[in-house]
Amino acid sequence: EGVQPVLCCAAKKKLILYKWVGSSFDEWKEIALPDTPACMAWCGDSLCVGVGRKYTIINVRTGAEKPLFDSNSSAPAIFRLPGLQEMLLGRDSISVFQDFEGRPSRKYAITWGAPPSSMVYSHPYVIALLPKSVEVQLMETQKAVQTISLRASAVVPSPRDDAAYVLANNQVYRLRPVPVYRQIDILMESESYETALRLCELCMSQPQVAAKADGIYRAYGLSLLAEREFDAAISQLTRCTSLDPREVLSYFPDLCPAGFPPASAPLDLKGHQLLRAYVSLIKYLNALRRRRAAPGGR
C-alpha cells in the first residue's frame, strides 16, 4: 500500500502483515481477531475484514477498528471495485456500496437472486456467482441483464479485455461480452428502455453506440407517454432530434393533425390528468421551438 508495499495474510485468528524491505517481505506486525477471517480487502491504509458475520475496517498502522454491519444469514463477501474508492459488501442477497471509510457511498444497492459468493467487474457490468447460477447486472441501474445456469466455484477477470473466466463443472468457461451496440438492440427488443439508455450513456464514446441514442430517446419517451408518465416522457422526447412532433400530438385525439394517423393507443384523459398532460406537452413544444430557432437547429 502506498510507496512501500504491504502484504497481509490471514492465519487462524489473526492477520500477519509484511512490509517490503530491500528485496523481500519482512514480518511487520500481527493483529488479533476474534475468529478466522472469511474475506478481506485493502481499502487505502486499512483492511476491510469479514469475521464471523461482521464487517470491520482495521487501520493497519494504528490498529484502530471501525465496526460496520452484519452480513445477516449469508457468509460475508467483500469486493473492491477496481479504479474506485468503493467496495461492495454482501448482506443476504444484497451488495451494499461502501467507501474506504466504511460509509455508504451510493443511495442504492445491488439485489441478487441469491447471496453471491464472489464477483468481478467487467465494465459496465458486475458478474456474481450465486449458488446455482452466474448473474450479470448493469451496475448503474441494478438491473439483471443475464442469468447463466452454472454452479460456478470461482470467477476471475481477464487482464487483457472485458472478459471473465468462470470455473464450473471441472471446466473453465470464458464469458465474453456481446458488443454494446448489439446488447442495446436486445434490450430494445425486450422494451428494457431504461437499461438500454443507461448502457448507451455509459458507452457513448463508441460511434455505433452513440448512433442509437436518438432511437432510444424516441422509443423510451413514447413508452412513458403511453404509461402517462408525462414529465418523464417529455424529458426523453425533447432529446430526440429525429422525432416528428405530430407523432407526439397523435396521442391526443383532440390535437392530432388532420391527415396524420392517430396513435395505435391514444390517451383517454380527463380532468387534472389531462391538464398535467397538456402542461408537459406545452413544455415539449416550447423546447422544440427553441431548438429549431437556434443556429443549425433541427
Image (cartoon, rainbow, N blue to C red):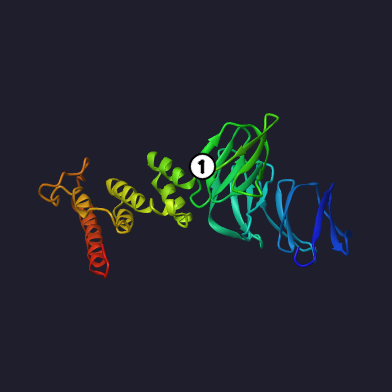
Q: How many marks?
A: 1
Give the image location of residue 13, x and y in percent.
84, 49
The residue sitting at the front extreme is 207
At x 19% / y 45%, what residue is drawn? Answer: 268
Q: Nearer the viewer, residue 205 or 274?
A: 205
Question: Residue sitting at 32 percent across and 47 percent down?
Answer: 219
Kind of residue at badge 1: Val
Label 1 SS: loop
- Which quadrant: the C terminus? bottom left
The residue beneath circle 1 is 178
Left or right: residue 86 versus residue 235 is right
When the figure is inspected, residue 245 is found, relative to residue 190, above or below; the finding is below
Is residue 283 found left or right of 149 in the rendered image? Answer: left
Residue 160 at x, y percent in the picture? 64, 49
The residue nearer to you, when weighing 266 against 121, is: 121
Residue 288's x, y, as percent?
Answer: 24, 62
Taking the image as shown, residue 63 lies to the left or right of residue 248, namely: right
Query: What is the quadrant of residue 119 in the picture?
Result: top right
